[in-house]
């Protein structure tokens, strides 16, 4: 066996498995990934293991300090805070991920179209993006949320509306990034080759450009999930996002708006805040590491 | 730019027109006849387009409408609040830039040292913690448990202090909000300085400077730092809207009488002229800010021409 063949890996590794390998070899990123997996299990599997998953109201033990039966105490209706934390996490994470997917799809498609066709399509799409980006985000969200409150949207549907709202705010920056990338990629040799081969516009855009924008999109996706969760929690904290009876981490923290709960009943608002912080921090660490992996020029 | 402004105002106006209610319809004591009369008085019965043009015409002349809750012109209501917000924003702006530039540069010169690691951890904490949660934690700790600082508002209840005492009183109330805004703002800025500095330290001219036998101090501070600071000038311009916009959530938590809080309050009381004006005001600042950033960048870095603005922004 020659030295050369020993040095070479047995099977050439693809971009994705290589990236994953490098990701888990970084201690911080591995910890972050672990924390995220645990958080996802906690929120999506946890409620099935909890004896209180029905959200039973038991006024006799209302706002009780943490005990063995209720590790995080109970809220003002005697519901188990731990279970509620899991259910709230489900909603918060779902809203974050769904709004990320939505804005990613919108942003990627519009960005590719704008960068590929240039001309009028580009002008229109980018002007709309500029427009949305020049209205400050949170005020715009508040105004949109206020309209929803006025329209008396049912609490269950509000969750979906919050997702849509967040993606309306989210897509312009993604579209701008993707467009920039596409503008440089379309000059590459392989894109010229697809032209020579006479491939359809659709195929050129989504089979040849899209995969090459993918690494960028993965990075943007993680970071935009984090900001989606953050915005949702802020809105819900202000009472404008997900509203009771649905729990989200943000509206659980708004228990702190009541002075007594804030001063004496820490278990009502501290755990959701910590869960929120851990989740967002883990996503940010992952996103940062992914960016280093996919874009070596940015490496620290 | 002007077109962008008109577009923004049109969107915002249309959004408010979409709302099914107005200030008067939340008052149940009004008879339908009186309701119609009041609406006619305020021109609320007219079609949206007409109302928009009227509003635009007035706005150009500096008349942004009338706050129905405060019963005064909007500009009069907002003007003092802007300065309250500016006070907090400016204090935290100065602190943020000092802290971020110093820690960012130091962390970059000692990459992978303990200090650098600590900075990196703090940086992620700052990027990840929700502002309202941090605010609550600090209030709980410093105001409720330790009782060192006031929990909110700008002055003590029924305060009669004047002169120096009043200044100190406001300063004491400012500590927590400013601390939060500084911590949150310093995160991304430190990261910016750190990565900018790292990039410069690896550049060829730095190697040349070192090879020339310059002291490490001179290399870092007069060669690398200068180039690392250059792009930061554009960030200064982007900060413009943030200085006046008032931090909605922080002001809400600390009960600070600023632009952010009245915005939220006016949405709830349906005082739409006020919200409209603030939103437009912020949009103007954002647009002017990003324009300034482009211009400053072109001045600071002659390699960039204004033509490439889509790439730089």
Image (cartoon, coloured by chain):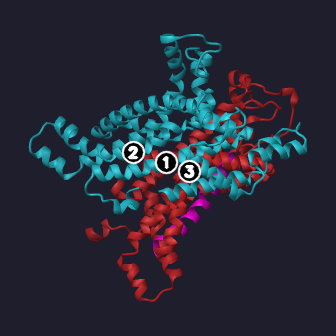
Q: Is residue A128 something one can see in this rendering? A: yes
Rendered image: mark on residue B286: 1
Chain name for mark 1: B
For disc 3, the chain is A
User: Is A148 situated left or right of B164 in this image?
Assistant: right
Question: Dot 1: within a 10 Å radius of its alpha carbon, few (fewer than 14), some, or many (20 or more) residues?
Answer: many
Mark 2 near mark 3, Cβ–Cβ under 8 Å? no
Q: Is residue A114 magenta?
A: yes
Quadrant (top left, top right, bottom left, bottom right) of the N terminus of chain A? bottom left
Which picture quadrant has residue B109? top left
Q: Are marks 3 and 1 in contact (CB under 8 Å)?
A: yes
Give the magenta-colored segment's residue range.
A89-116
User: x and y percent of residue B268 in the render?
Assistant: 73, 39
Q: Secondary structure at mark 1?
A: helix
Q: Please tell me if label 2 and label 3 are on a single chain.
A: no
Q: Chain of mark 2?
A: B
Image location of residue B205, percent across then percent down: 17, 50
Looking at the image, residue A232 lies above or below residue B169: below
Earlier-in-chain disc, 1 versus 2: 2
| Chain B, colour shown | cyan
Label 2 CA crowd tier, 10 Å (few <14, some 14–19, many 20+): some
Q: Which residue is label 3 attached to?
A: A135
Residue B206 is left or right of residue B61, and the answer is left
Chain assigned red: A
Q: Which residue is mark 2?
A: B235
Q: Secondary structure at mark 3?
A: loop
Q: Picture coordinates of residue A102 (x, y %)?
A: 62, 61
Relative to A70, residue B37 above or below? below
Image position of A45 (left or right of B114) = right
Residue situated in front as seen by the camera: A161 or A147 = A147
Residue for point 11% across, 39% down: B214
* Residue B39, percent from left and from top: 79, 46
């Amino acid at each position: 066996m020659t030295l050369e063949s020993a040095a070479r890996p047995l099977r050439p590794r693809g971009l994705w498995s290589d990236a994953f390998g490098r990701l888990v070899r970084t201690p911080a990123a591995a910890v972050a990934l672990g924390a995220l997996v645990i958080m996802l299990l906690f929120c999506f599997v946890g409620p099935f293991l909890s004896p209180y998953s029905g959200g039973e109201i038991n006024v006799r033990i209302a706002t009780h300090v943490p005990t063995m039966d209720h590790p995080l105490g109970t809220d003002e209706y005697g519901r188990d805070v731990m279970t509620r934390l899991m259910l709230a996490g489900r909603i918060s994470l779902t809203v974050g991920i769904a709004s990320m997917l939505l804005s990613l799809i919108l942003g990627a498609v519009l960005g590719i179209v704008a960068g590929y066709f240039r001309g009028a399509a580009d002008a229109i799409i980018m002007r709309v993006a500029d427009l949305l980006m020049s209205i400050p985000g949170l005020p715009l969200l508040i105004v949109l949320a206020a309209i929803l409150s006025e329209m008396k949207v049912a609490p269950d549907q509000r969750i979906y509306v919050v997702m849509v709202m967040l993606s309306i705010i989210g897509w312009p920056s993604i579209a701008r990034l993707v467009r920039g990338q596409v503008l440089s990629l379309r000059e590459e040799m392989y894109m010229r080759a697809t032209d020579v081969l006479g491939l359809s516009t659709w195929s050129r855009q989504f089979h040849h450009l899209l995969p090459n924008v993918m690494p960028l999109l993965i990075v943007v996706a993680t970071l935009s999930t984090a900001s989606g969760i953050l915005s949702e929690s802020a809105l819900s904290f202000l009472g404008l996002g997900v509203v009771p009876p649905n729990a989200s981490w943000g509206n659980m923290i708004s228990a702190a708006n009541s002075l007594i709960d804030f001063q004496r009943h820490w278990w009502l608002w501290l755990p959701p805040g910590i869960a929120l912080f851990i989740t967002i921090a883990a996503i940010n660490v992952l996103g940062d590491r992914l960016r280093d992996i996919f874009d070596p020029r940015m490496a620290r | 730019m002007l077109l962008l402004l008109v577009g923004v105002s049109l969107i915002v106006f249309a959004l408010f027109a979409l709302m099914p209610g107005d200030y008067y319809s939340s008052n149940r004591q009004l008879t339908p006849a009186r309701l119609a009369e009041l609406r006619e008085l305020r021109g609320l019965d007219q079609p949206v387009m007409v109302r928009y043009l009227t509003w635009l015409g007035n706005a150009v002349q500096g008349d942004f409408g009338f706050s129905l809750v405060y019963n005064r012109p909007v500009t009069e209501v907002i003007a003092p609040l802007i300065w309250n917000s500016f006070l907090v924003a400016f204090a935290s702006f100065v602190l943020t830039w000092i802290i971020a530039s110093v820690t960012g540069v130091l962390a970059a010169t000692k990459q992978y040292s303990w200090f650098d690691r600590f900075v990196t951890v703090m940086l992620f904490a700052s990027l990840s913690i929700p502002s309202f949660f941090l605010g609550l934690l600090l209030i709980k700790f410093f105001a409720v448990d330790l009782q060192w600082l006031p929990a909110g508002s700008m002055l003590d209840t029924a305060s009669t202090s004047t002169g120096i005492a009043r200044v100190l009183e406001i300063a004491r109330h400012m500590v927590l909000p400013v601390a939060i805004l500084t911590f949150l703002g310093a995160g991304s800025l430190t990261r910016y300085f750190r990565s900018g500095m790292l990039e410069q330290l690896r550049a060829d001219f730095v190697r040349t400077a070192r090879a020339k036998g310059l002291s490490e101090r001179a290399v870092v501070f007069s060669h690398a730092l200068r180039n690392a600071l250059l792009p930061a000038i554009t960030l200064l311009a982007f900060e413009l809207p943030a200085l006046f916009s008032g931090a909605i959530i922080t002001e809400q938590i600390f009960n600070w009488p600023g632009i952010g809080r009245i915005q939220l309050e006016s949405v709830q009381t349906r005082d739409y002229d006020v919200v409209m004006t603030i939103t437009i005001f912020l949009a103007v600042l954002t647009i002017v800010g990003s324009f300034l950033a482009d211009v400053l960048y072109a001045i600071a870095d002659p390699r960039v021409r204004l033509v490439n603005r889509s790439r730089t922004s």
